[in-house]
Image (cartoon, rainbow, N blue to C red):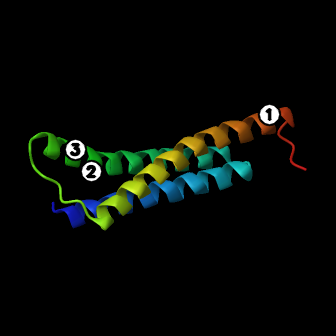
Amino acid sequence: MDNYEVSFTLILHAGNAKSAAMMAIEAAREGTFEEAQRLLEDAKKELQQAHQCQTDLVQAEARGEKTELSIILIHAQDHLAMAMTATEQAAEWLYLYQKISELQGGVSS
């Protein structure tokens, strides 16, 4: 895979991960915790695929293969970092929304 393919694959999977993480937060806010958990798992799976692309780049460079640095690749790495943060934060939001729901006795106002 060339750098553009790798970059766009990273952007695709990182974008999907971030979207799923944000939808998980929304589902948790609405009290649909099973759906929220499913979406969080989807985000993690997408993140794994994106991370694998990054790992492939790192391993290629470790083997002595030079990676051409481009704005697209930097942009893709930024997407991956944002997706990782969003997914980690989504897990915390899910936990917090569940605790709030428990404390409220599962009753919404």
Which numbered disc flags the more N-terminal residue, 1 or 3? 3
Q: Give the SS element for disc 2.
A: helix
Q: Residue furthest left?
A: 64
Q: Nearer the viewer, mark 1 or mark 3?
A: 3
Q: What residue type is labelled 1?
A: Glu
Q: How far apart are marks 3 and 2 (CA)?
A: 9 Å
Residue depicted at x 34% and y 59% = 74
Residue 90 picture quarter:
top right
Q: Nearer the viewer, mark 3 or mark 2?
A: 3
User: Which quadrant is home to the N terminus?
Assistant: bottom left
**Between 46 and 84, the one nearer to me in the picture:** 84
Mark 2, residue position: 53
Above or below 39: residue 5: below
Residue 62 picture location, percent across and down: 15, 40
Residue 3 picture quarter:
bottom left
Asked whether the viewer can see residue 107, the reply is: yes
- Tag of residue 58: 3
Q: Which amino acid does label 3 sit on?
A: Val
Q: Distance between the residues labelled 1 and 3?
A: 44 Å
Residue 79 picture location, percent across and down: 43, 57
* Marks 2 and 1 in Cβ contact (< 8 Å): no
Does residue 4 appear left or right of residue 29 in this picture?
Answer: left
Asked whether the viewer can see residue 8, the reply is: no
Above or below 102: residue 36: below
**Between 105 and 54, the one nearer to me in the picture:** 54
Q: Which amino acid does label 2 sit on?
A: Cys
Above or below 87: residue 16: below
Task: Give the crowd class for mark 2: few <14, some 14-19, many >=20 residues within 10 Å.
Answer: some
Task: Give the crowd class for mark 3: few <14, some 14-19, many >=20 residues within 10 Å.
Answer: some
- Tag of residue 102: 1
Which numbered disc flags the more N-terminal residue, 2 or 1? 2
Q: Distance between the residues labelled 2 and 1?
A: 39 Å
